[in-house]
Image (tube, coloured by chain):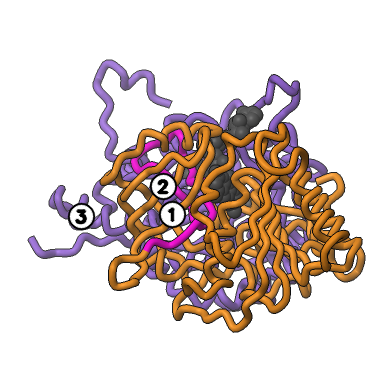
Amino acid sequence: MTRVPRLAVVLNRLQLASPILVASGTFGYAREMADFTDFSSLGAVIPKTVTARPRIGNPPPRTVETASGLLNAIGLDNDGLAVFITEHLPYLVELPTAIIANIAGHSLEEFQQMAETLDATQGLSGLELNISCPNVSGGIDFGTNPTMAGQVVERVRQATSLPVIAKLTPNVTDIVAVAQAVADAGADAVSLVNTFHGMVIDWRRRRPVLGNTTGGLSGPAIKPLALCATWKVANAVEIPVIGIGGIATIDDVMEFLVAGATAVQIGTASFYDPGLASRLVSDLQTCLRDLGLDSVGDVIGTLELPESSAAARS
Amino acid sequence: MDEASPTPAGLVPTAVQRTARVIEQVEMARDTFRLRLECPELAKRILPGQFFMVREPGLTDPLLGRPFALFDVACDSQGEPVGIDFGYVVVGKLTRRMVRWKPGDPVSVCGPLGNGFPEPCDGHLVMVAGGIGQTPFLAVTREALGQRRYGDPPRTAAARPELTLCYGARSANQLAGIDSFPAEGLDLRVATDDGSHGHHGFVTDLLQDLITNESAPTMIYTCGPEPMMEAVAMLAAEHDIACRVSLETPMACGFGACFSCVTRIRLDNGQWDYRRTCVEGPVFPAEKLHWSDR
Ligand SMILES: Cc1cc2nc3c(=O)[nH]c(=O)nc-3n(C[C@H](O)[C@H](O)[C@H](O)COP(=O)(O)OP(=O)(O)OC[C@H]3O[C@@H](n4cnc5c(N)ncnc54)[C@H](O)[C@@H]3O)c2cc1C
Ligand SMILES: Cc1cc2nc3c(=O)[nH]c(=O)nc-3n(C[C@H](O)[C@H](O)[C@H](O)COP(=O)(O)O)c2cc1C
């Protein structure tokens, strides 16, 4: 029993050494985490969303803590694609892990151009398309419309040979329909969820707490919601699902894997426990070994429904 | 990217994440306490004006760490740094829980974070503190007096400035840790809003007085409520005195990953941009800050 369980996972064209990834916007550009993280243990690092042009972001306060959660409206504060490529990418691609750039465009053309530009760089393992950020106005809300979501994926697929992940918003009536559309359009995987629309009010001052009035909720508070979305999508679409939302312990990781996620992303938890993601990789190894399993694949999608509730599926 | 970033954005070269133990907790003033945590690695590295994130392990509410400035480093009998002290005021979720922390309790700490104050300068250094904003100045004072060295390797203060601390609080019972400050080598001047101790009025009156009636200081450091710091920065600008401001912008992570603790920084082209207080500050040259409408 000294076998080391295999953690490698395959998400269509994307092959990762471990199913533990870190979520965009919660890991900076990775430099910020260098003192706390063993990058080589991670399946992939997904840096903060990059947009075609620099964005100043939303006025502060940009975050406020809620019961077991965090509400944020950062507003995609970033220096734009050109600076990303000259300042951040050289550092990122030298790290001993896969790098998946996360991009957000204002239009189909912009998504396509950004994908083309990144296709010409060296060292990326894939692209994650942020069609789900709740804190920016002006662009088209691709993630809430299955047809539009599919078109983004199609255009990006034409622009690059890199594997493509579509990151979905939970702020829709039917997330399965969006997942199905991006799968049909050729996405290698879907990642879900981005944050849930939320609000905090300082009622004494009769004012919203966030500078942007509303924001996106993340952290342990959203885990059951994210898990349910993951389970529904994993049951409905052929492509692999990357589960995101409130993951902070090895039990959380196992729940998402059992629900059908092929990989997971650690988000908000990295803010209060920056060493967590790499620790979870060894926790996962230990957990699989204790279960006597050879590979993480042996737990993915192993949820069993009692007879009586089987009808309630999907 | 521009000249305002001295190092690649977000570079934190020395921070550690540890579970520390509470060594002691002492009441300093009304609703104000000092906690000492055992954490040698952090104690050895931290500089005056740097901070660390503190959280109660295992809880999800409060969820995030909270930033606290170094008050002082505690050393063992051999003079080795073993503990970190910070002072806190009870204001919300975590600080209300902290009051109940007992020796031996585990505490998650992450640091040292931020840039801290520069090395002591020559001439006359005046520190202007409002409320709990006084905490960074004990370590600044000790370093400037040559009583203690901070950092790894320990930095040596080349200069020995004349030191004045102007410290303001709402009332006498909220003046914290006055007796912690060295009696020798520091000119401590106090103001209270209600006149119950020292000057009756704002701490900025003390600074104004000092500038008008004595000689202008070489350097001003300030930490406290933003309106106070803005007033200090205005005075410094008016009299052409170098000034460093330590901001207390609320933070979610403390090490640059979340981009929430942004503050407006002036650029050379006359524009401003949001910059992360945690990694580019919390100490900024006053003239870099874009105060209005923040
Ligand atoms: C670099 C730095 C150094 C610092 N150093 C020190 C220090 O040395 N000592 C010290 O005492 N403090 C210091 N602070 C401030 C300290 O971090 C805060 O006081 C601390 O985070 C409070 O935590 P809490 O959980 O007790 O309060 P929280 O519950 O987080 O509340 C914080 C404040 O926000 C208000 N608030 C919270 N939620 C809401 C809401 N929904 N609507 C309206 N208002 C709300 C609360 O009333 C309170 O005033 C520092 C801050 C920074 C950035
Ligand atoms: C402060 C903050 C910033 C975020 N920024 C981004 C971003 O730039 N791009 C993106 O795709 N998701 C962003 N997210 C969403 C996260 O990647 C993740 O999907 C979400 O927080 C849910 O996971 P969690 O509960 O583990 O944090 C951000 C989340 C937070 C809390």
Say if labels 3 and 1 share a chain.
no
Quadrant of the displayed image that contains ligand 1: top right
* Residue found at x 60% / y 78%: A90
Residue B225 horizontal side relative to residue B112, left or right:
right
The chain to which mark 2 is attached is B
Observer-nearest residue: B263 or B37? B37
In this figure, which residue is indicated by the disc labeled 2?
B35
Q: Amino acid at mark 3?
A: Thr
Whether the magenta-drawn stretch holds residue B266 is answered as no
Say if labels 3 and 2 share a chain.
no
Whether label 3 lies within 8 Å of ligand 2 gets the answer no
Residue A114 percent location from the top left of the image: 72, 63
In this figure, which residue is indicated by the disc labeled 3?
A286
Q: Which chain is orange?
A: B
Q: Is residue B247 above or below residue A227?
A: below
* Residue found at x 92% / y 65%: B270
The quarter of the picture where the C terminus of chain A appears is: top left
How packed mark 1 is, by other alpha carbons closer than 10 Å (few <14, some 14-19, many 20 or more), is many
Q: Is residue A53 visible?
A: no
SS for dot 1: strand
Residue A54 horizontal side relative to residue A73, left or right:
right
Whether label 1 lies within 8 Å of ligand 1 gets the answer no
Say if labels 1 and 2 share a chain.
yes
Numbered disc in front, either 3 or 1: 1
Residue A97 percent location from the top left of the image: 44, 70
In this figure, which residue is indicated by the disc labeled 1?
B85
